[in-house]
Image (cartoon, grey):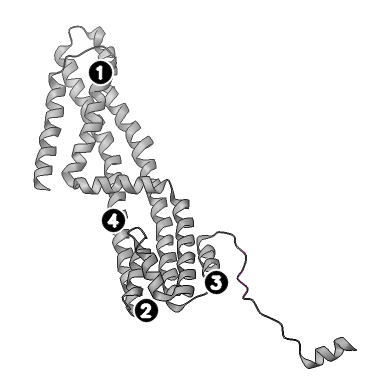
């Protein structure tokens, strides 16, 4: 982390040092590239000063998952119901074999704990702690995006100041001031756009995903505990779909009506 912070700081200083030595040009591709480097590069490496690179990669992974949240809910319900059927037919051994095929996550942890004969209370406690760990990771990713949303306008303002200093240093005629001011304000423009059209919406999207995944983790915990109690698959499916807000038919156990002797006599009469 110390090496990463030092490298990020050196690159950050280099970006601004390079900006001071670039030639002042008319509004065009070169000026836009200069503004983009200051805003994007400055925001990225300023963030790397505070957070490890692994946290940024984790944030990108969460953002990717946030765009397939509904699929995750449906997959969770289908997987838990399928595991319930396997548990009903084959018992814990068949459940353990199926659990080995699952991806890493809360469901795989719960199935493994059942296979290792943990008590119901221990299973509940461990799942709760792992869910809290996931929540902490989500909070870190959310803070990173909020930090980047604040850094982008600041870097844009810094880029504008740099370009103004360069402009006044190369200004030969006051008539050219308006044109060079447009170049200077490019950085502020990119900073505001990057913050309000990119980082703020993405942080809101991540917050929505966090709330949805909290619900999903509660569903998993309830589903694993119902597996432990040997809940009927149809009853489990109805319960999970109700928690997820998915319309479903209420579970009705199959009850055979036995005709009483009195009813049989009335029927014969």
Q: Nearer the viewer, residue 163 or 10?
A: 10
Rendering coords of residue 218 (x, y %): 42, 65
Determine which residue is flagged by label 2.
120
| For discs 1 and 4, the disc positioned in front in the rendered view | 4
Q: Quadrant of residue 251?
A: bottom right
The residue sitting at the right extreme is 269
Determine which residue is flagged by label 3.
235
- What's the CA distance linking mark 2 and mark 3? 20 Å
Q: Secondary structure at mark 1?
A: helix
- What's the CA distance linking mark 2 and mark 4? 26 Å
- What's the CA distance linking mark 3 and mark 1? 64 Å
- What's the CA distance linking mark 4 and mark 3? 33 Å
Determine which residue is flagged by label 4.
137
Q: Residue at x 44, y 54 (%)?
A: 72
Q: Is 253 located above or below residue 209 in the figure?
A: below
* Residue 251 falls inside the magenta stretch: yes
């Amino acid at each position: 982390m110390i090496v990463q912070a030092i490298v990020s700081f050196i690159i950050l200083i280099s970006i601004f040092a390079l900006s001071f030595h670039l030639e002042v040009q008319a509004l065009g591709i070169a000026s836009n590239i200069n503004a983009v480097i200051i805003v994007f590069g400055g925001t990225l490496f300023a963030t790397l000063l505070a957070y490890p690179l692994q946290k940024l990669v984790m944030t990108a992974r969460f953002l990717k998952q946030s765009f397939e949240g509904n699929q995750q809910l449906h997959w969770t319900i289908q997987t838990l119901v399928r595991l319930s059927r396997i548990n009903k037919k084959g018992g814990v051994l068949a459940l353990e074999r199926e659990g080995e095929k699952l991806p890493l996550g809360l469901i795989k942890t719960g199935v493994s704990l059942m296979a290792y004969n943990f008590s119901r209370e221990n299973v509940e406690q461990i799942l709760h702690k792992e869910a809290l760990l996931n929540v902490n990771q989500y909070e870190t990713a959310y803070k990173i995006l909020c930090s980047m949303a604040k850094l982008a306008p600041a870097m844009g303002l810094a880029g504008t100041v740099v370009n103004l200093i360069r402009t006044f240093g190369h200004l030969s005629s006051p008539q050219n001031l308006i044109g060079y001011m447009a170049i200077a304000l490019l950085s502020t423009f990119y900073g505001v756009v990057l913050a309000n059209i990119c980082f703020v919406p993405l942080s809101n999207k991540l917050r929505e995903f966090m709330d949805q995944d909290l619900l999903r983790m509660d569903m998993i915990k309830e589903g694993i505990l119902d597996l432990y109690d040997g809940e009927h698959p149809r009853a489990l499916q109805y319960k999970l779909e109700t928690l997820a807000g998915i319309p479903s038919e209420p579970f009705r156990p199959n009850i055979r009506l036995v005709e009483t002797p009195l009813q049989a006599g009335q029927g014969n009469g």
